[in-house]
Image: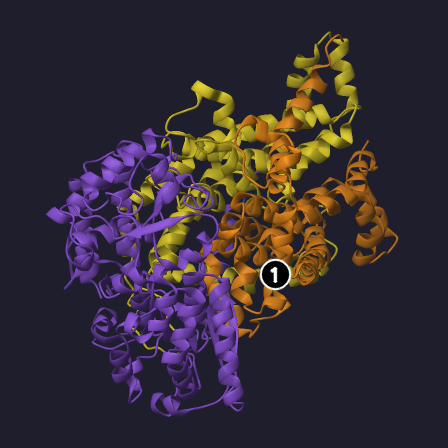
Amino acid sequence: MKFRSRNLIAALLAVGLAGTAAACGGSDSGGDADAATQARGAITVWLSNNKEEVAWGKQMVAAWNSAHPDQKVTAQEIPTGKSSEEVIGAAITAGNAPCLIFNTSPASVSQFQKQGGLVALDSFSDGKQYVEDRTGKTAEQYKSTDGKYYQLPWKDNPVMIFYNKKAFAKAGIDTAKPPLATYDEFLATSRKLVAAKAAKAAIYPAPSNEFYQSWFDFYPLFAAETGGKQLVEDGKSQFASDEGTKVANFWRTMYAEKLAPQEKYTGDAFVDGTAAMAVVGPWAIATYKGKVEWGAVPVPTSAGKPASETFTFSDAKNVAMYSACKNRGTAWDVLKFATSKEQDGMLLEGTGQMPLRNDVAGTYPEYFAKNPDYKSFADQAARTVEVPNVANSIEIWQTFRDAYSKSVIFGQQDPGAALDGAAQKVDQLAAQS
Amino acid sequence: MSSRLATAPSPTGSARPAGRRGLLGTVLGKQPIGSAFVAPYLVFLAAIFAYPLAFAVYMSFHDYFFTAPGAIVDRPFVGFDNYVTVLSDPAVRRSFLNVGIFLVINVPLTVILSLVLAYGLNSAIRWRTFFRVSYYVPYVAASVAVVGVWLFLFNENGLVNTVLGPLAPSPSWLVNSKLAMPTIAIYVTWKQLGFFILLYLAALQNVSKDLYEAASMDGAGRIKSFWNVTVPGVRPATTLVVLLATVTGANLFTEPYLLTGGGGPNGASASPVLVMYQKGIEQGNPDIGSAIGVLLVIGVLLLALIERRFVSKEDR
Amino acid sequence: MKIPWRFITLLLGAFVFLFPFYYMLIGSLQAEPDPTVRGAFPEPGNLTGENYVEIDKAISLGQSLLNSGIFTGGVILGTMVFGVLAGYALARLQFRGRGVVFSLMLLVQVVPFQLLTIPLYVMIVRSYGLADSYLGMIAPFAINSVAVFIFRQYFLQLPQELFDAARIDGASELNTLWRIAIPLVRPALLTGVLVTFIGPWNEFLWPFLITKQQDLQPLAVSLSNYLTTVSARAANPFGAVLAGACVLAAPAVALFIAFQRQFISSSLESGVKG
C-alpha cells in the first residue's frame, strides 16, 4: 500500500493551475478621485466598541442624521483589541472598508497607506488647514513621510503613573506627593511597597510579547528621558542611546528584583490590588471609579525632571478615511462634525479622553473645573510623543519588543547589547519604504 | 476499522477486471457516477481551498502586499528571496524547533493515553457513560473558553503552583522558556484526547474477540494480551491518530496566541503559524508569511509520509 | 480481581478532564477570585450570579445563539449531504480522478487556515459579494474535510459483498448509499457531526471578519468582543471571563450530552462487523 505520490503531484498541479488563474485576477479601477471628494450620500463608519465610546458615537451619529436625512450615517462597532488591525487590513483589501474608522491606530497608518487604503485628507481643499488648526503643533507627528495627512489626530490618552493610595499608605509612603520622580526614588518606593506586602507587585506592565506592549513600559519613559524623541526619527532608530539604555536598565532592575512580574495577568492588576501602580492613560479612570483610590504622577526620569518638562507616550487613536469610500464629501463633513468643538467636548465629557486639539484645558474650562482629576492629563497632553509614522512600523515595534523581552524582562542578554542589535534591524526596516 | 484505514484509495472492486465497459470504462472509471458524487466537494475544494492556497504560493515568490482594489503597484517576481529571508530569520527557525518539541511530546502522549483510555472504556464498566462524557467535554468546548481556566490554574499564583508548593517551577510554567512549550503540548493533548479516544473506540470494535480468547487460552495476562492483541489490532487507527495529531499539532496557533500572549517567553512558545500570522497579517508582509506557510506544509507532508511508513510498517 | 485498576485509572482520568470545567464553573460564580485551594470549593459568601447578569446585559444571547445555530447548522448540513456523497464515492466507487480528490482532501488538512484567511476573505467578499451574510460565514467551512475522511474510512470497512449484491439487483448508487451504506455507518455520521460541529461553533475570527452587523454575529464572536472590552472593568474580571467561557461551552456540552447516548450506543452496538 504505497502512498501514491503521483496523486499528490496531480493534486498539487491542480492547485498550481488555480494559482495561474489567481495571478490573473482582474482589478477594478479606482474611479475619479476629485469627483469622489465632492460626492455625497449615505456612509458607514466604524466605532471602537468600548461602552463610553459607543455611547458617544451613537449620539454623534444621531445628531448628524437628524440634521442630514439625505446623507445617512450608519455606525458599526469593531473591537479595540488585537484583531482590529487585521479586520481593517482585510476590509481594505476586499474594498469594503467603511468611510471612516474612529479607532485607527497611528502605528498602522503607514501600512494602510502603503496598501492604498487611505484617503489623504489633503485632497480636500480645507483638509490640511483643518487638521493643523485643530491640533496645532502636535499634528506634525501624524504627517506621513510624503508630507500628507492620512489620519486626523483625534484623541489621546497621555499615559502617567497611577498609584493606589491605600497601598501606598499601607507601606508608609506619602500619598499626596509620593517619591516617584527619579529612577532611584521609583525603585526605592517599589521595594518598600513589595516589602511591606502592600501589593504583590509594585507595578505590572503587560510582560507579553505583543508588538504594542512597549508603548506602556519602555516608550513613555523613553519619551520622558529624551525630552520628546520618537523611537525612530529621520529614518534612524533613537533608542540605542544612553537614554534608551538608562530606561532599559531601570526596567531591568524592576524585573530582576521581582518588583514587576514576568507573567501576563488576566484582568486588571491595578484594579484588583495586585499591583500598586500602573502605566496608563485617563481612559482608565472610569474603570477605577469606586474601586481604587488613585493618584497620578508623570512617568519617572533618571534625573527627576519637573512635571512641566516631562514628555510621555500619547496612546492616541485617530480617524482615517478609507479609499473604499464613495461619498467622500459627506465623509469629510462628518469627520469635521465629529471633531468639532462641541463633539470633542462630548467626547471628553463621556469618555475622559483628551481630544487632540490645541489647549484642551483652556477650551473646556468648566469640565476641568468639575473634574480636577483630569487636569494633569490635559496638561500632560501638551507634551506627548506618538509612535513614529514610518514604513514597517509594526514590524519595527515587534523587533524592538522581541529584544526588549529577551533582555529586559527575562534578563537573558545585556539590555544595552540587545538594544544595539535591535537598532540595526530597525534601521534597515525603516529604510525600506 | 479495517486494515485499509488511512491509506491511499485502494481499489475496492479491483478483484474484478475492468473489462465490461471497455474504452469508456478505462477513461471514466468503472463507476463514473462517482465523479458526480464528488463534484460538489471538488467544487468546494477548488473554490475555497485551491484558489487561496495557490494564491499564497504565488505570493511567496513575489514581493507582494495586499492593496485596496484599484491601487496600482509593482509586485516583481523575486524567486526564492522570501524563502531565504524566512530561513535566515532566527525567530522562524526557533518556531519550527518549538513545534518539533511540541510534536515530540504531544504525539506519543496522545497515542498512548487515548489508546489506554479507549481500552479502559471499551468494556462493561460502571459509570461508562459518565466517563465517556467527561473525556469528550474538553474536545467539545472552545479553546478560547478553556484557555481562561488554564491560565488561572497554571499562573504563578494559580492553583497548580499552590498545590505544588515548594515544588512549583520557577519561573512559573508559562513564562519558563523550558516549560512553556511542554505545558502547551500537554494542554493540547488534554484538549484533543476525546476525539482520538473516539477513533480508537471505533477501531476496538473490530478487534476480534476470538483473538483475546485465544490469547487467554495461551495463558497471556491482561497486559500481555493488550500488547499482543489490542495494539496490533488497532494499528491502522494508530496510523490515523498519529497523522491527525501531527497535522493538527503542526498547525498550532490558538494556544500560544492566547496562552502565552504571542509566543512568549522570548518566542519559546511561538509556533510557525503564529509567526506566519504575525509577519503575514499583523505586520503586513503576506509574501513572507506565505513562504513560512508553504515551508510548513511541505514539512508536514514529509513528516506525514515518514510517519506513515514508520507506524504502519508491519501493516504492509 | 481485588483492585479495580481499570476503574480507578478511568476515575483519575475523568477527574483530570473534568476538573478545569468544574473550576471554570466555580470561578464564574465567585464574586472575588480565589486562587487558593479553598477557592476550588463553593463558598456561600463568595457566590454570585453577577457575572452572568452582566453578560446577559451586554449581549443579546438569543440572537447570538440563533446565529450560531444557523452558522453551525449550515455547515453540518453541507457536510452531511455533500461530505457523505464524497466520502462514499472515495471509498466505494471507481472513477477517473479519485486519487486526485483524495490527495486534495489530505492536503486540505495540512494547510493552516491562517495562510488562506486573507485571500479567502477577499475572494468571498469581493468576488462573491457575500459580506454580512450567513452564506459568507458558512462557505469556507461548508464541507468539513476531516469528516469526509472519516466517512470514507467507515464506508471502506463495509463488506464488498453487500455492494455487489445491490449492484446485481440493479439498485442505483444513490439508492445503495441511502438504503444500505448509510444505515450501517450511523456512528460515523455522528462522529462526523461532532467533528463538524465544534469548528464553526467555536470559530470567532472568520465570522467576525465577514460580518460587522451585530445581529448576524454568532455567540463566539459576541463573547470574545465582550471579553476584550468589558471583562477588564467587570467587578471580578476573572469571573467575567470564566462566565463567558461557560456560556460558550454550555450549549455545546449540553448538545453533546443530549446526543451522546445514541452516539455511543450506536458506535458500540451497530452491526457493522461483529
Q: Nearer the viewer, residue C89 or C124?
A: C124
The answer to whether residue A328 shows anywhere in this view is yes
Q: Residues within 10 Å of mark 1 (few under 14, many from 20)?
A: many
Residue B304: % across, % down:
50, 39
Chain A is shown in which shade?
purple
> Which quadrant is the C terminus of chain B positioned in?
top right
Residue at which label 1 appears: B42
- Judged left or right of residue A216, residue A75 is right
Establish if C269 lies above or below A93. Answer: above
Is A396 on the left-hand or right-hand side of C129?
left
When the figure is inspected, residue A26 is found, relative to residue A349, above or below; the finding is below
Q: Secondary structure at mark 1?
A: helix
Q: Is residue A392 above or below residue B250?
A: below
Which residue does the image show at 39% across and 34% down from the upper left?
A: A200
Q: Position of residue A54 (x, y in %)?
A: 50, 68
Disc 1: host chain: B
**Vertical position of residue C71 compared to residue C103: above or below:** below
* Left or right relative to A355: residue B207: right
The quadrant of the rendering that contains the N terminus of chain B is top right
**In this structure image, what is the colour of chain B?**
yellow
Q: Camera-side residue: C81 or B311?
A: C81
Say which of C134 and B115 sits in front: C134
* Residue found at the far right of this picture: C169
Q: How many marks?
A: 1
Residue C145 screen position, x and y as percent:
61, 51
Whether residue A420 is visible here, answered yes or no, is no
Report the amino acid beneath label 1.
Answer: Leu
- Front-most of A218 and B117? A218
Give the residue at x 53% y 41%: B147
- Report which colour depicts chain C: orange
